[in-house]
Amino acid sequence: MKKTSLLLILIVWGLTLTQCRTYDRSDFPAEEFEQLAENFNGDVGFYLMDLESGNTFEMNADTLFPTASTIKIPIMIGIFNKIERGDLSFDQMLTYDGKHDDTWGNDLINQLKPGAEVELSKLVHLMMSTSNNTASLWNQYLAGSGTEINSLMDSLGFEHTRVNSRTDGRQKNREAYGWGQTTPRELAQMMRQIFRGEIISQAASEQMYRIMTRNYWDGEALSQIPPYINVASKNGAVSRSKSEVLLVNGPSGDYLFALMTKNQEDAGYEDDNEGFQLLRDVSELLYGHFEPGDDWTIAR
């Protein structure tokens, strides 16, 4: 009887898994997304890929948008490129000299006293998790400046992704796009290649992916995904532009999307900012599409 019961349990479990795997994910709710974009007071760029089927959906995916803090992904890649070449070590100690202070306020690193020591690994984690700007500017310098990072992006096939801030010859681009510029397609493909182990090396890609699964800023697109789901993400915000890229390791299969905005009428930073709300709405729509059997809801 025990063997029979166990066999029945395994059969039911197997059927359940089969149903998850054979779920038709191709019928993307395009009309719902297009309605959200049409109602938005600003420009929207979007790129989605279902990593199980390879199916994509896009809107203005090759249009340039301000990166805001998503430029920190290319900066991180630049750091790991230096580590791979032996120019840096992930656990090496660095001495703070105040030269890379961020002038935008208290962000922990710029509160250090000159002469204080900090590990490079912590600078990278602070840059990606809490989006620490002083750590990011320091990392940009360590990666060889925006010039070297841009050359690396070009060599990796990302012809539109560029660092503008503190980079020779990029002043006009900085005036138009801020710290950096990219397209939704390139931002998403960068994340996908990291996930697949194709950026710098398998080991470097795996470390970068782990780092991006620890995002402190979880109030927008990330907030619409259950906390028990592994997600790699990076978001960015300036007054008239809000963006986020996520790779979701869902139970029924992985999916990836990058949503970027610019020219927003709503230029604030409050939780109800129209750009932040669009990120939440699209993320909720996507998770509901790819995981229709998950009845999780946000606890209030």
Image (spheres, rainbow, N blue to C red):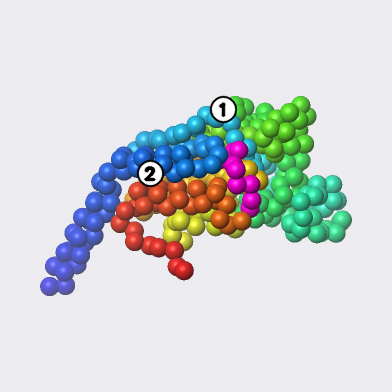
Considering only vertical position in the picture, is 14 above or below 68?
Answer: below
**Residue at figure coordinates x 18%, y 59% from the top left:** 11
CA neighbours of label 2 inside 10 A, class few (<14), some (14 to 19), many (20+): few
127 and 180: which is toward the camera: 180
**Residue at figure coordinates x 58%, y 57% from the top left:** 271
Q: Which amino acid does label 1 sit on?
A: Gly
x and y, in percent, of residue 287 in the image:
39, 51
CA neighbours of label 1 inside 10 A, class few (<14), some (14 to 19), many (20+): few
x and y, in percent, of residue 67 in the image:
62, 39
Q: Is disc 1 placed on a helix, strand or loop?
A: loop
**Which mark, residue 222?**
none
For the question of whether residue 222 can be seen, the reply is yes
**Residue at figure coordinates x 41%, y 39% from the top left:** 34
Which residue is identified by label 1? 157
x and y, in percent, of residue 111 in the image:
80, 59
In 3D space, how far apart are the residues under numbered discs 2 and 1 (Cα atoms)? 32 Å
Q: Is disc 2 placed on a helix, strand or loop?
A: helix
Q: Pick out the residue farthest to the bottom.
A: 1
Tell whether 263 sits left or right of 191.
right
Tell me which numbered mark, 2 or 1, is placed earlier along the sequence: 2
